[in-house]
Each structure stands twice: as C-alpha cells, then as structure tokens.
Amino acid sequence: MRILSKLGLAAATVTLVAAGTVLPADAITVTQAKAAQARLNKLGCGAGPVDGKVGTMTKAATVRFQSANRLAQNGSPTGTTYTRLMARTAKRCDVRAVPARSGSGRRIVISQSQNWVWLIDARGKVVRQGGMIDNPRYLRPGTYTSGAKCGRAARIRKNTDGGRLYLNNFVRFAPCGIGFHQIPTYKSNGRQIHADYLLGTNYKASHGCIRVSASMSASIWSFAATSVRVVVMR
C-alpha cells in the first residue's frame, strides 16, 4: 500500500505538470531549456548546442546574460531570468556599454561585477571587448598604468608561473605581478587549463591576474605596446 501510494503521488505530480501547473522556481522543462539556449545563442551569450540540457556551458552563458542585464548571477535560466531572456528588451551579452565614471580617453576598463573588459581608443571608441576571469581579493578597484613594475618587464610573450604553466601574452599593469594574459596553458601540451566559455563568469578565479581568451590577449598585447591606463571598477 505504501508503495502504491508513492506511485500514485508521482503519477499525480506528472499529471499536474503536464496540465500546465506552475513549476518550481528552479525547474525548467526540456522545451524551455532549448528555447533558453537558442535565445542565449542569438544574443551572443554562447550557450552551445541547443539540446535541452542545462549543463556548465549553458549556465555560464546564463551568467553572462544575467551580468549584462543586471540580474542576480546564479546561472539558472529560470524565473525572472527566463522572462527577461525572452523579452524583446533583452540586452546582448557580447556588446556592452562601457561603465559610467570610467573616465575618458585611451584606456582599458575592467568591470569586476560583470567579469568584462573593454579596450577603448583615444577617440572613445570601443575597439575590443570580452569576458574575463579575475580575483577581486587581489586586484582592487582603482586606476593603474601598464608598464614595468618592481623591476619586472612590462610585457612577456611566454611568461611562466614558475611551474607547469605558461601565461602567454602577459601585460603587466599593477605591482608587482598582476597583468593580463591568456587563460594559462600547460607547458606539456599547450592546452588551456579551462575553456573559453567560462570567461565572463565567476566559475573560476585567477591568482590576481586577468585571464582572457587567446585572441583578446593578443589584442591587449598590441594595445599596450605603449603605456595605457587601466581602470578597474567593481
């Protein structure tokens, strides 16, 4: 009898959901998940395959959407996030306004709350932007300048952590060892320690530096060939 009761309850639950009963706030149907993934991809958030499975890639894309749209960054494409995602007013993930009060002129702007970085030329035009990973415990808000620090070179093509990793295209901007670089790669095989799709999220943390994609690190390397201001904002 106890087993039958449990089976009956389960059946009733399935029936209610099928009838259109409101799902819990943290639940999402396969159809909704596919719709969310398709919409995230259309908005440049990078959700990956539209397969209805809310895995790490979809969650990371959701975080990027949430940060771009000033929502709580929990990685769940449900509730308010789903509603905002499907709205015509949803903001793209890959094209964002430069934060107010970041100054003017040629500069690199970092938003730690958005996990995002902008390269801005002397005319105020954004020449490149994209996701990043940092560690706010080490890098404090403020204005810095790229260049040599503490007797160390301003730029190092193949920097190392002193162990098994390379920090490629390293551009120093804060004392003593903080700079921009590609997501670290293993010396043994050249592979990155984590995927690009985690950029723009808090799913990873650096040891104080700013991790970016390989192409973004190359852009920063060129942009910082001459000294440039780096504005760090929460």
Image (tube, rainbow, N blue to C red):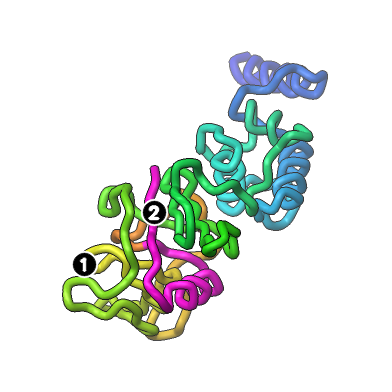
- Quadrant hosting residue 173: bottom left
Q: At which x and y percent is residue 151?
A: 17, 77
Q: Amino acid at mark 2?
A: Val
Badge 1: residue crowd in 10 Å (few <14, some 14–19, many ≥20): few
Determine the residue located farthest toward the right in the rendered image: 19
For the record, the magenta segment spans 210-234
Residue placed most toward the observer, 86 or 187: 86
From this view, report whether residue 30 is shown above or below residue 8: below
Residue placed most toward the observer, 48 or 7: 48
Give the spatial CA distance, label 2 vs label 1. 17 Å
Residue 68 in view of the camera = yes
Determine the residue located farthest toward the left in the rendered image: 150
- Quadrant hosting residue 14: top right
Image point (34%, 63%), residue name: 209
From this view, report whether residue 189 is shown above or below residue 177: below
Q: Return the residue at label 2.
A: 231
